[in-house]
């Protein structure tokens, strides 16, 4: 494999992606060589030499990436070429028996992505833990709930934050799905038609920590749907993160004044000495857009590609790397912001009174006390709300009711006491105790259930990491035995 003319060669390079794949590629090479020897396809002494040299290349990762990688077409060619340079083609040239770069690269991407997805699961769980803790401290913290960004009904900070928690819990399970579709082995598919050598695909899958073999050899090298799936998880997760970021940005303005963002996640202004700008949250919001762009890119690259391998597929990987790194970093940033978030509880509670947030409960009370239809009660309360009030008394309600239905509400059984009760913010919340509502009792139940879910998800993650780790230890053991 000769070195190529530089400017021309640069066009087909994908350096960042290849750096990202280096570690995985060495693993794939080792597993393949161990299997080739076990199947009697190469000799013991040959395997020993190749494995020794691979270990050396692995140890010189930094140097290799700096000096060797850029001289070849891609990381796979680079490693094989250096191996051959070191131990000669007679032996080194046997490593690629029964294999193609097509199954090699697909396997490498899956290994590298698998590690990133496990790391992301950890980050998402830490964010969920931070949210749950903030929520648990604020079960009694009253705030206005919004629709259309207008004051709507009172709720609590815990209820609001648990809504974000649930979105991230779904994100976690989406990442798990992506992981499970990623962690299958295409190795052995070769170019697409597999090979006539008696290779053992199950064996390489096992020692590389895959859950199973991606069976059809044509599918194995052609598909990047697992990449699309991972990036769509990221896109969804980033969208959820950006909505939380947006709320925290808004809530930290003087207009809302609900929270203050921790100092290390804010920056000053070069001209206005008083400023504390929420740049980190703003960049999370912006990078959600970047990730949506990555998703569009990979969908567009893969659409209408004929089977099996086309070089177009190489163009997918850099988007994956960028989306992966950006998403993980964004989750970590939001975790830090949530952990250090300070709440201005009095301000929140004060604002919960503004904008007639108890109007729904008032209409509900009229229905319960007078037995009129909800639509009629809505009309009565709505005529009062038009006047821009935050509160009403029975007297005003009676007047409006006379105009709307020709009768006073007190004649139908509504008392001043019940009207006052309907205006009470705390009671509004307490009454909303149906499943999923903001009532303390219900929020406490949700908190408990979510802690259990989070513990279960953490155990899943630990067990999965452990499985992969054990397989890779097995691989290193086999490499060690062969080398002896
Ligand atoms: N660098 C290539 C990629 O990422 C490796 C596979 C090359 N295969 C080929 N048939 N040219 O897709």
Image (spheres, helix red, strand yellow):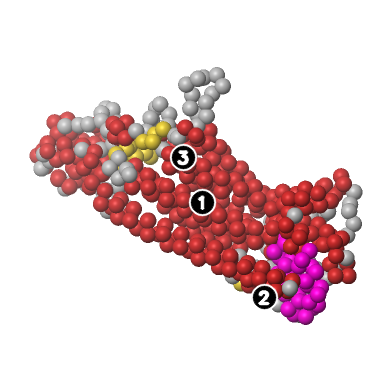
**CB atoms of marks 3 and 1 within 8 Å:** no
Q: Mark 1 points at which residue?
A: 123
Look at the image and say whether residue 196 sits in the magenta stretch. Answer: no
- SS assignment for the magenta stretch, majority: helix
Local secondary structure at mark 3: helix
Q: In which quarter of the image is the N terminus?
A: bottom right
Query: Quick one: 131 or 89, which is closer to the camera?
Result: 89
Residue at figure coordinates x 72%, y 57% from the top left: 59
- Residue 204 seen in this snapshot: no
**CB atoms of marks 1 and 2 within 8 Å:** no
Query: Quick one: 390 or 24, which is closer to the camera?
Result: 24
Residue at figure coordinates x 54%, y 63% from the top left: 465
Eyeballing the image, is 467 above or below 391?
Answer: below
Spot occupied by residue 123 in the image (x, y as percentages of width and height): 51, 51
The mark total stands at 3
Q: In which quarter of the image is residue 356?
A: top left
Query: Quick one: 378 or 80, which is closer to the camera?
Result: 80
Q: What numbered label is drawn on residue 337?
A: 3
- Residue 236 seen in this snapshot: yes
Q: What numbered label is drawn on residue 317?
A: none
Query: In this image, 117 relative to 28: left or right?
Result: left
Spot occupied by residue 142 in the image (x, y as percentages of width and height): 29, 39
Disc 2 versus disc 3: distance between alpha carbons? Answer: 45 Å
Q: Mark 2 points at which residue?
A: 203
**Label 2 or label 3, whichever comes before in sequence order:** 2
Q: Does the residue labelled 2 lie within 8 Å of ligand 1?
A: no
Spot occupied by residue 184 in the image (x, y as percentages of width and height): 62, 68
**Label 1 or label 2, whichever comes before in sequence order:** 1
For the record, the magenta segment spans 25-53
Q: Counting other residues with Cα less than 10 Å from the Cα at mark 2, is it few (<14), some (14-19), or many (20 or more)?
A: some
Disc 1 versus disc 2: distance between alpha carbons? Answer: 32 Å
């Amino acid at each position: 494999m000769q070195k190529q003319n530089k400017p021309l060669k640069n066009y087909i390079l994908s350096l960042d992606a290849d750096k990202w794949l280096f570690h995985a590629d060495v693993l794939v090479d080792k597993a393949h060589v161990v299997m080739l020897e076990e199947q009697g396809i190469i000799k013991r002494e040959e395997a020993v030499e190749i494995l020794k040299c691979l270990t050396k290349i692995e140890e010189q990762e930094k140097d290799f990436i700096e000096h060797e990688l850029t001289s070849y077409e891609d990381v796979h060619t680079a490693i094989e070429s250096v191996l051959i340079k070191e131990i000669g083609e007679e032996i080194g040239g046997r490593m690629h028996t029964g294999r193609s770069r097509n199954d090699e690269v697909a396997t490498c991407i899956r290994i590298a992505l698998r590690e990133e997805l496990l790391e992301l699961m950890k980050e998402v769980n830490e964010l969920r833990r931070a949210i749950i803790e903030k929520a648990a401290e604020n079960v009694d913290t009253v705030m206005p709930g919004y629709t259309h960004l207008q004051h709507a009904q009172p709720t609590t900070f815990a209820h609001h934050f648990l809504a974000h928690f649930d979105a991230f819990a779904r994100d976690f399970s989406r990442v798990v799905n992506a992981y499970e579709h990623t962690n299958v082995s295409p190795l052995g598919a070769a170019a697409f038609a597999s090979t006539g050598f008696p290779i053992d695909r199950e064996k390489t899958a096992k020692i590389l920590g895959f859950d199973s073999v991606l069976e059809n050899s044509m599918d194995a090298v052609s598909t990047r749907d697992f990449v699309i799936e991972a990036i769509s998880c990221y896109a969804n997760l980033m969208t959820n993160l950006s909505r939380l970021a947006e709320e925290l940005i808004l809530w930290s303005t003087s207009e809302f004044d609900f929270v203050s963002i921790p100092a290390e996640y804010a920056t000053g202004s070069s001209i206005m000495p008083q400023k504390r700008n929420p740049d980190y949250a703003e960049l999370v919001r912006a990078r959600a857009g970047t990730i949506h762009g990555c998703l569009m890119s990979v969908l567009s690259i893969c659409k209408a590609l004929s089977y099996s391998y086309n070089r177009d597929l190489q163009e997918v990987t850099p988007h994956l790397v960028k989306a992966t790194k950006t998403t993980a970093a964004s989750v970590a940033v939001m975790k830090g912001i949530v952990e250090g978030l300070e709440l201005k509880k009095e301000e929140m509670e004060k604002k919960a009174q503004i904008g007639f947030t108890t109007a729904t409960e008032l209409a509900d009370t009229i229905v319960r006390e007078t037995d009129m239809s909800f639509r009629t009660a809505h009309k009565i309360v709505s005529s009062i709300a038009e006047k821009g009030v935050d509160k009403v008394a029975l007297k005003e309600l009676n007047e409006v009711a006379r105009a709307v239905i020709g009768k006073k509400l007190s004649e139908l059984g509504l008392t001043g006491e019940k009207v006052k009760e309907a205006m009470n913010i705390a009671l509004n919340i307490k009454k909303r105790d149906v499943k999923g509502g903001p009532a303390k009792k219900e929020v406490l139940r949700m908190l408990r259930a979510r802690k259990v879910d989070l513990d279960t998800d953490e155990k899943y993650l630990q067990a999965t990491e452990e499985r992969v780790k054990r397989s890779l230890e097995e691989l290193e053991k086999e490499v060690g035995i062969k080398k002896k």
